[in-house]
Amino acid sequence: MNYQRFFEEAIDQVHAERRYRVFADIERIAGAFPRAIWRSEGKVEEITVWCSNDYLGMGQHPDVVSALQNAAGRMGSGAGGTRNISGTNHPLVELELELADLHAKEAALVFTSGFVSNEASISTIARLLPNCLVLSDELNHASMIEGVRRSGAEKKIFRHNDVAHLESLLAAAGRERAKLIVFESVYSMDGDISPIKEIADLADKYNAMTYIDEVHAVGMYGNRGGGITEREGLAHRIDVIEGTLAKAFGTLGGYITGSATVVDAVRSYAPGFIFTTALPPAIAAAATTSIRHLKGSQAERDAQQRQVARTKEVLTAAGLPVMPSNTHIVPVLVGDPELCKMATDRLHGLHGIYIQPINYPTVPRGTERLRITPTPFHDDLLIDRLRDALVETWDALGIPYGAAGRPAVASSERIIPLLVPKSGG
Ligand SMILES: *Cc1c(COP(=O)(O)O)cnc(C)c1O
């Protein structure tokens, strides 16, 4: 038996489907986001990152970095074990209080990632409810799909954000059957927002439980960064609010918040929580600092929204096919997997800009795109350079412009993309 062969064939399959990924070898420069060092084939260069999920740049915030350093200096690097076996490091206790307060819930539970929090919580909740029917939005994240699958519960998929479809499925199940609706607030590939109020109304009408993933909204929406549920005043209408500490909060980890009973049940039954070492205390301390900062400071959210609006405006004015989005995510349509890859290679090679191509199966075929995420640190000059680099790339590769077409731009209005300074090897 040649075991290696099966793995080679599996990899060949990914190549054949043109889904094989090569990761960029980058080193983000704290204090200079969105600048980073990119290493490839022995070359070392400085680039601008336009596809980070460190949406507010909190990963380089001096208070967050020093909270991490201080806690590591006092308590060391690791947690020392699972919480069941080795107890809970105090910074994790504080973090959970902070999170419960953020979403105005009774309790919170922290996991080692957002992925694990969804997988562990959804599977446990749906498994503890007798004969539960899970109603899941068709565009839900892989971690939620895994949770539903692992629960062993029956599931029905409703069309994306389609409340009429959801209602027909709820009505068919009847008021008496246990039902769990799982959905997201911000869907991160299109940047659209779900009809949370309508879904909460349906949950009341048909007596269903609700679970929302606010991963792409926490820190960024609501007066204190409590997400879209906070912004819309709907947090109290959702049973479980899940989020990550790894995106806008700039650290690592995931969590759920909800009633003390639901959280205690997940704590007591979820293998993905019980049998794995807790988050390091330094990460917990950094996350708490980041959440506290964003609870009290509107500056990062305002700056992000301003730079996002400007990016959409500038790219649209250049005729680029910016896809509609109500959020901080700026998708630009390419519509072809090869072109999408060529475009991002060219943006890197010629313009020193890093944007990851988004291809099938992450998005439907024919909607391959660049997914651009402006942060408060992408200033107006960087946005202008991005536009010029995209226009040059669109022209060179013959990628279709938006419906309005490419407007004539006087060359004097164009900023010539600066050649990327090469730093020493
Ligand atoms: C990134 C992501 C997660 C997972 O969060 P991590 O903390 O990165 O594991 C969960 N849900 C959605 C919608 C995501 O995009």
Image: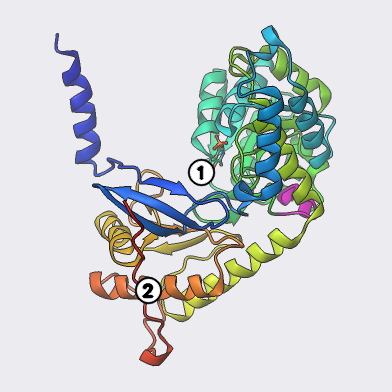
Q: Is residue 413 left or right of residue 22?
A: right
Question: Where does residue 272 sit, x and y in percent of width and height?
Answer: 59, 18
| Residue 242 is at least partly visible in this image | no
Quadrant containing ligand 1 = top right
Q: Is residue 148 left or right of residue 391?
A: right
Q: Which residues are magenta?
A: 221-231
Say which element carries label 2: loop
Which is more toward the observer, 172 or 45?
45
Which is more toward the observer, 225 or 24?
24
Q: Between label 1 and label 2, give the one nearer the viewer.
A: 2
Q: Which mark is residue 139?
A: 1
Which is more toward the observer, 335 or 67?
67
Q: Is residue 51 left or right of residue 229?
A: left
- Snapshot quadrant of residue 335: bottom left
Q: Amino acid at mark 2?
A: Leu
Tell me which secondary structure the magenta stretch mostly adopts: loop
Q: Report the residue at 75% width, 50% height from top.
A: 294
Q: Report the residue at 28% width, 76% height from top.
A: 395
What residue is pinned by disc 2? 418
- Snapshot quadrant of residue 166: top right
Q: Is residue 157 left or right of residue 69?
A: left
Question: Where does residue 81 sit, x and y in percent of width and height?
Answer: 63, 13
Question: Where does residue 40 sit, x and y in percent of width and height?
Answer: 28, 48
Within 8 Å of ligand 1, the CB of disc 1?
A: no
Examine the rendered structure and indicate whether residue 235 appears above or below residue 84: below
How many numbered marks are there?
2
Question: Where does residue 49 sit, x and y in percent of width and height?
Answer: 45, 57
Examine the rendered structure and indicate whether residue 10 appears above or below residue 299: above
- Residue 387 is one of the magenta-drawn residues: no
Q: Amino acid at mark 1?
A: Leu
